[in-house]
Image (cartoon, grey):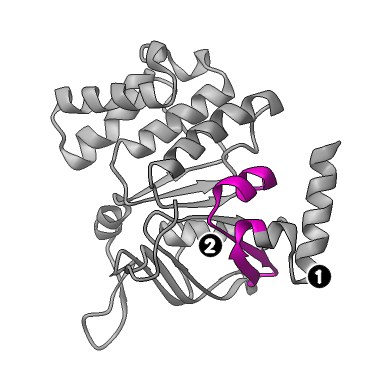
Amino acid sequence: MGGTEDARPIVRAVNVAKAFHHLEVLKGIDLEVYPGEVVCLLGPSGSGKTTFLRCINMLETIDGGRIFVDGVLMGFDDSGPHLRHLSDSAKSAQRREIGMVFQRFNLFPHMTVLENIIEAPLQVRGVARDAAIARARDLLSMVGLSDKEENYPSQLSGGQQQRVAIARALAMDPKLMLFDEPTSALDPELVGEVLRVMRDLAEQGMTMIVVTHEIAFARDVADRVVFMDGGVIVEQGPARDIITHPREERTRQFLARILSDQAE
């Protein structure tokens, strides 16, 4: 885990703004994430965490600022005198470099586990079928589901479906993985199996931005915690420092409430 600031950031957000129907959701977000770094975004509902994640992946279009992934401006072309939106196909090409795992698993219900994982490498990257299958089986082994490749999503638990969703995202060999509260839709006893896979990814050096309320995971796995509230970054720093000794009162109140809820 942990990038060095000598490297070029994988993600660089500069003064990012986003509004929905005149409601400002992001109010000038500046953030850099370095290769191999795990950054957890914490904050109350409505603080802008998920919106920011979706802006990185261009599922939402920013209203101001810039987002760069591996030095490439996302969603726009700034080569001419005026900034212009990229075409949908150009955005899709940029999005190939980013894996995203959602709260809901979004697996294709009519496809087997193996078919779900190989679909994008075959259709988007043009990978040979045998190579895609070999890679998918390696990933299923990594997430502990080697025996489920012929199952359909409806035959899996929520935790198993989420692990397949992670394998599917990794099948595209992304430079960056985004996780939007990947355990929030799971029964409590299934949360650990998904977090274990994410811990393994972190140990392997995958660059990850994780929106989560799993404070123990953030403390133990993240290099850095970013606390957001009201569309701004309130504070950020080394994970254990922020979680153990937050500087800002808003951060202290949030963590106290979450830790109290999780202790019940």
Instruction: Left or right? Give the position of 28 relative to 262.
Output: left
Which element carries disc 1, helix, strand or loop? helix
Which element carries disc 2, helix, strand or loop? helix
Q: Is residue 253 visible?
A: yes
Q: Is residue 73 above or below residue 140?
A: below
Q: Which residues are magenta?
A: 212-240
**Amino acid under label 2?**
Phe
Instruction: Left or right? Give the position of 174 relative to 16.
Output: left
Rendered location of residue 99, percent (x, y):
38, 46
Residue at the image position 47 percent from the left and 20 percent from the top:
153
Give the alpha-carbon distance from disc 1 to disc 2, as whole Å: 23 Å
Residue 249 is marked as: 1
**Amino acid under label 1?**
Glu
Residue at the image position 61 percent from the left and 57 percent from the top:
239
Q: Is residue 46 visible?
A: no
Residue 27 is marked as: none
Q: Earlier in the sequence, mark 1 or mark 2?
A: 2
Residue matched to label 2: 52
Residue at the image position 64 percent from the left and 34 percent from the top:
185
Q: Is residue 83 above or below residue 159?
A: below
24 or 247: which is nearer to us? Answer: 247
Rendered location of residue 14, percent (x, y):
45, 77
Q: Quadrant of residue 112?
A: top left
25 or 213: which is nearer to us? Answer: 213
Instruction: Left or right? Give the position of 243 relative to 253.
Output: left
Q: Is residue 226 above or below residue 156?
A: below
